[in-house]
Image (cartoon, helix red, strand yellow):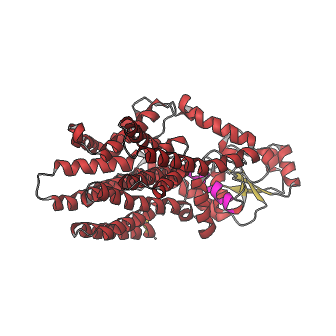
Amino acid sequence: MSFGDITLESFLLFLIGLLFAAASIWSQNKDRVKWTAWLLFGMTFFIACGFATITNYFFIWDEQFHALVAKNISLNPAHPQLMTFAPWLFEESNWSSQTTWLHKPPFFLYAMATSIKLFGNTIIAARMPSVILLAITSRLVFLFGNNWKNSKVGFLAAFIFVFSGFTLLQLSGWKSTDHNDVFFTCLVFISFYFFQKYLILPSRKSALKIGVMVGLCVLTKWLPGLLVFLPWGILVLIKIVRHSIDVKNQIKWFALALFIAILVVLPWHLYTIVNFPEIAIKELSYNQEHFWIPLEGHRESFWFHFQNLLGVFRILLLLIFIPFYKWKQTDETSRILLISVLALLVFYSFAATKMEGFIGPTLPLISLLIAQGILFLLSTIQKERLILILAPLLILFFQPLQFFEKLGMKKGTIENEYHHLYRAQHDFIIKHGDMDSKKLILNANMRMHGNIQWMYFTQNKAISFVPSQQAVKRLKNEGFKLSAIQFGNPLPDYILKDQEIVKVKYE
């Protein structure tokens, strides 16, 4: 059952999320910090679940590839694979048709694999780890703001972060690179949350937590996950210059966190270099090339990421700078947040390859700065409680309309027509796919890389092209039962005349 193009399940999840949002507004106005934190968790969880169930299919770039690799990891954790059969059929240099798949670092893939192992090869199983992590992050954004300024800043920041919508669209698979970037955004912020705890009370335990989180960041996206060490390193250098009493401890905890991060990251890279040396070294080199070469056509202007931020936050972005008009009077945390945001933006602006998702880790940090700017601007107004009610409601009212249009929920749009094509493909896969792991589907490219979704939702094998006559004979000798999709260009005669090959017309 559906409401227009929104399923009943998604509609109910959105409704529950909005009820949690209303309850969080009530709780915040009663100054109940613990209750508000958990209500924001619930709000984000159900809203994110609504987005995770809004489609019953994956998007091309890159969610369906991540999902299939995760499914294969759930079956064989020791060997990350995209294609698990007939390796001689595929070009190992192309990440969209590799057997051994090391194109992305592993942490988010193994989290998805765990969910798929528990809940099966469904849409929600692949997206659930991102849902949970986003809900945790929204709660921590609130607590960060509360520890930094007050609960009002934390509350507004959590709402701005969630309903700016960028991460929700990634979580739904609409924006590349989907769960990889959701995980990276959340983990980077969690490392800053632990860093805030460290600044309040420096200790070995806090340093260990930072190190673990940074390690997981690097195992999700790569070296930009070290971001928290930039402001931390600056603070350590300042203490060295000023000959602070506790400078030795500060250096010790910094070195410990860095050492722990290396310990978290190193085993995976040693394992892959030993077991898959050629591919592992090539992928490490490929990661570095992102900075020097605009890979896969992602060539944009220097200001691309700054323009994206303006698109996400619109005029709100200008509110960041209001509290900084007297730099010397700004607090340490404000400077840390601003310096970290600008450093990441500048780093990615100099990188040759530019993609929307690269700005992700700045979003929770910017949300906190915007929330501070709003309340700083309104500090002379006596109706702050009214603002805390109206601001979230305005965000809720306007942003979802844009979300649904981008997700193709608005009829008559190009996006809507595009998504109808993918719904048709999904229905075809479910109708003709089954649990036979020896069935191989040829020409399963009804939409780009349709074979990937076919292998995720069924147990069949599938390829997007028609193999040569010799390759067909070899596949038969390896025990595959072949079916060919009649779609696009006519099938070659050696396929049409082969009575052993089942022909299925796509319609």
Q: Is residue 127 left or right of residue 341?
A: right
Q: Is residue 218 magenta?
A: no
Looking at the image, which is closer to me, 367 or 189?
189
Looking at the image, which is closer to me, 258 or 279?
258
Please name the predominant secondary structure of the magenta segment in the image. Answer: helix
Residue at (24, 59) in percent of width and height: 152
Q: Is residue 68 magenta?
A: yes
Residue 304 screen position, x and y as percent: 41, 34
Residue 3 screen position, x and y as percent: 40, 66
**Residue 68 falls in which quadrant of the image?**
bottom right
For residue 50, above or below residue 173: below
Residue at (74, 54) in percent of width and height: 84
- Is residue 3 among what the camera can see? no
For residue 352, above or below residue 227: above
Residue 241 screen position, x and y as percent: 38, 35
Magenta residue span: 62-74
Q: Quadrant of the C terminus?
A: bottom right
**Residue 288 falls in which quadrant of the image?**
top right
